[in-house]
Amino acid sequence: MAGTWVALNLAGVPHAVRPETHWLREVFEKLGPLWFSVQASRPKARELHDAFAGALGRFDDLIRNGARMAPASRAALQLTLEVYEKLDIDDTIGTELLVPYRAFPALQALVGDGFAISDAGLAIEAQTDDATAIKWKAGGAAVAAPGAIVAIIDDGVGVAHQRFRSAPDRTRIAHFLDMTTNGLDTSGPKPTEELLARSWTAEQINQLLAAHVEDTDVYRAMGLIDFKQERRQPLRAATSHGTHTLDTAAGEASGAGGYPIIAVQQPAQVAEDRSDAWMPQTLKRALDWILVKAVDLSWEYGRERIPLVLNCSVGSMAGPLDGQSDMERRFTQFLRVYRAGDDRLAHVVLSAGNNLQARAAARHKAGDKCPIRWRVQPDDRTPSYVQIWLPLVDAGAPQQVAVRLCPPRGGPATAAPSEREKVVQWQVDSKVLASIYHQIHRRPGNKMRECITIAIRATADDGDPVPVVPAGTWMIHIDNLHLDADAMIDLRVHRDDPGLFVRRKARQSRFEHPDYVEFDPVSGRPHNDETREVSPVRRQRTLSAYAGGTDTIVVGGYRRSDGEPAIYSSSGPTDGGRVGPDLAAVSEESAAFRGLIGAGTQSGSVALLNGTSVAAPQVTRRLADLLAAGDGVAELIAEVEGFEKAPHGPHGSYKAARPLRAGRGRLPRQSPRFRIRIDD
């Protein structure tokens, strides 16, 4: 198996901006179109918008070669331009383009002079029409407006559930977007064809509710499930993550019918591959669609903006955690545009993550010559990844470190070091088994950070005639070139656990160190104090990679019975100035009764789920109530004592939650988890 290490130039390969996408596309020969995120100056963003509206210009070659922009993204871009010009916001604007392979050269030729490729993700293999125009600002009816809008982006959203209705045949789902486009037949009202997605309005869902008694029949008519198909269909299961989360956030709300809901169902591929080759592009497209639909819904009620709370109980384990990633910048852009100068109008609530015990984060001192041990599991049928983030330095500084990778057995005699702006590949018989991507990421103030991404093949072949790599302990050597010996280097393993009801046999890799304390030596329980780490493998700095910024509200989880933090609830700090989660809510009833009860997939059923995913929507619910009353986050933080979560779930009331804990996630026993500072 020995083979050789080969260095290749990354210049001119636009989709290499996201190494996970480049790896899956090049190594596994996925030749379909890709979603590209671009960042453009205001003049270039205006020119891009006009080009996809039919104007001639420098984007002609790109469009002639098949590049497309979703109507919702174009409308969101127009809204963004209006707000940025009105408020004179001097920042770049992000949007998404679907680019076929033949258009890659045209896209690459546009880079520079206020236009940059910021991300790249895989696209669903499906054909849908996007001819329907967005009709925002078309309403203005003189009717009483709801106090707030609740939006959600999740996996498996049971839109027919009785908890999301105001009457037996009337839904509170104002707009629903399915991003799976799984090719299942629809027998009900024809959905609106978005670009690689389908959407329904409340009127269309109401027609289905009137025609069908069972939720399953509604989902069949919408083409969301088909029992003859083997592909993943989350609404076929008894428990679905999005249904449970939305029930906690907005199920059976008080008032006349409750708040309207805008829901986005992620593609099945997001749950099947957690590597960020799918998730960020999914979220950014969903943000555009929700932005346009929320503005449209506001105008239908004769309002400029109805207060909006968006719940995202999703996350990633690898990223810069400095508030400057493309995903974090898009959350900021979404909030700026919807708020349009009024900070109380919109909030995004994120789950903190469940990675505290995952051994997925490590800190390495630049002067330390010991290698980092990366344990890759056997029988893993998915690729595994590690990201290495270096400290902030001046732009133009020389290469800071070189990274070498040594497999547990069968590798080349010499491990080649990484080279900046190149990919170093381990090749055996023309097949690539592992790659090391060494990249530069620009930062404000003429600064930059280097990122080295390691990608390896699966350790099991699943019956396919493809090469595999050895399982075991891979050694990551970091050779210091120009960093101070005391400078800290962050390493993060990509998430690789399967989502709910996924058949792919993914197995999470992890870092290992002999000094890592897994269990408390006295009680034998999992060690749950991240402030006393004695090894490079850390429980600190494990927040979701999307939660590094300070514009979003990040929610951790704690146990109702004794107020202890959940053993999985991720911890700060981040390099973007965030100390930890802003709030903590109940995610476990007790050590023996795991999780919280909420709505199952079918009306009348209940399900039990835990994690910070079920903590975040409690904050979403309460924040929506406060926004509807004219209050906001300050009042939410002031409710450290006294807030009890409204009962939820079709079973009726049960023991009320203790108060939400505010102020960086302070808990009843003042756990230090959310009080750590960067210099601790």
Image: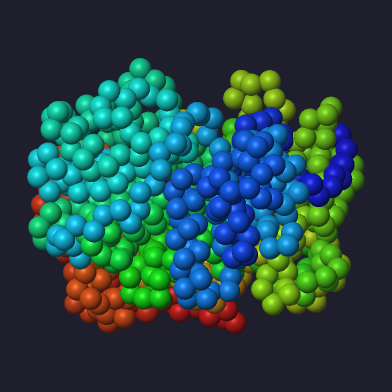
Where is residue 217 shown, x and y percent of the image?
A: 22, 26
Q: How many numbered marks, from 0 up?
A: 0
Left or right: 335 as drawn, with respect to 398 = left
Seen at 36% across and 42% down, the residue is 177
Looking at the image, is 338 positioned above or below residue 127?
A: below
Q: Residue furthest top?
A: 228
Seen at 48% across and 50% down, the residue is 73
Q: Quadrant of residue 612?
A: bottom left
Seen at 48% across and 63% down, the residue is 80
Seen at 22% across and 37% down, the residue is 205
Where is residue 311 shown, x and y percent of the image?
A: 35, 58
Q: Is residue 406 visible?
A: no
In-front residue for pair 172/105: 105
Q: Is residue 231 visible?
A: yes
In-front residue for pair 173/522: 173
Left or right: 569 as drawn, with respect to 9 = left
Q: Quadrant of residue 488?
A: bottom right
Left or right: 198 as drawn, with respect to 393 = left
Where is residue 51 shown, x and y percent of the image?
A: 59, 49
Looking at the image, is 280 positioned above or below residue 226?
A: below
Looking at the image, is 239 positioned above or below residue 182?
A: below
In-front residue for pair 244/53: 53
Q: Quick one: quadrant of the C terminus?
A: bottom right
Where is residue 675 shown, x and y percent of the image?
A: 45, 79
Q: Quick one: quadrant of the N terminus?
A: top right
